[in-house]
Amino acid sequence: MKANGGWKWSHLYLIAVFVVLYAPILYLVVYSFNSGGTMHGYDGFTLEWYGEVFSDTRLLIIVLNTFVVALFSSLLSTILGIVGAIAIHRVRRQRTKSALLSLNNVLIVNPDVVIGASFLILFTMIGLKLGFGSVLISHVAFSVPIVVLMILPKLQEMNPSLVDAAKDLGANGWDVLTKVILPYIKSGVFAGFFMALTYSLDDFAVTFFVTGNGFSTLSVEIYSRARQGVALNINALSTLLFLFTILLVVGYYLITRRNGRIQEAGARL
């Protein structure tokens, strides 16, 4: 069915969905430049709130904490995800493989509140002080299953004869991993890394449970400040985070596009 002018109703529905999703973000971005200090009336353009963000030493330290946790957790999650995906892929029995995949998916479908509370209880029982270490461990835990799901399809696409040929030519296990398997699945590895990075930067529920008094991340800090009243420096900070997320998405798109062209060129040869 088509609307007036040849438009399909599905197009109108898609536009409505994007408006609902992006209108609040656009509203937030526009008022981050409001000189009036409130979100009830636009009085003029200013960069004052961005200046406040960069002059707030505590906030800059929290930004640094957030990115350090995200980068370290993404790196560790990617390494563990590669090992886990290869281990699951090599399981011969289909029932065992399905069971392992189900266990891997538990942390993805499980509510974040349950995961956060579970880690809080665990860290309390073993006497681990809440802070950088507890947040890092928690982020690694919920990021590894995501990385595994990103890498497994690439392993399933790989022809097993590539590994057999490498072994026949004298390659040991490390050579097979670094010179055959990793180059083939690198697009999945990049996808898993960026997904883990995004999830770590975005997470609030789990982090809220395992953050100590002397350590915080941006999501927890923004929530704490928003409870005291919406200040436009929060808008400015959120705008910067949104722009950074766009850069990540564009970077991931360019990397996958480049890898696709390389694979197409290799297939032609």
Image (tube, helix red, strand yellow):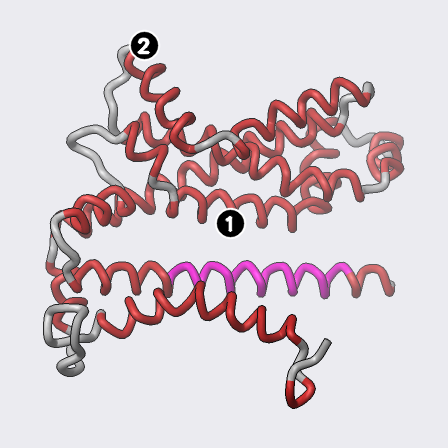
The residue nearer to you, when weighing 93 against 154, is 93
Magenta span contains residue 249: yes
Q: Pinpoint residue 72: horizontal percent, then vertical percent.
A: 40, 38
Q: Secondary structure at mark 2?
A: helix
Amino acid type indicated by mark 2:
Ile
Looking at the image, residue 208 sits to the left or right of residue 180; the answer is left
Label 2 – label 1 distance at C-alpha = 31 Å
The residue nearer to you, when weighing 214 against 75, is 214
Q: Quadrant of residue 232?
A: bottom left
In percent of the image, x 16 and y 32: which residue is there?
Answer: 214
Residue receiving disc 1: 194
Q: Quadrant of residue 69?
A: top left
Q: Secondary structure at mark 1?
A: helix
In percent of the image, x 29 and y 34: which residue is there?
Answer: 208
Q: Is residue 151 above or below residue 52?
A: above
Amino acid type indicated by mark 1:
Phe
Q: Pinpoint residue 144: horizontal percent, then vertical percent.
A: 53, 33
Q: Quadrant of residue 164?
A: top right
Looking at the image, residue 232 sits to the left or right of residue 243; the answer is left
Q: Earlier in the sequence, mark 2 or mark 1?
A: 2
Magenta segment's dominant SS is helix
Is residue 54 at least partly visible in the picture? Answer: no
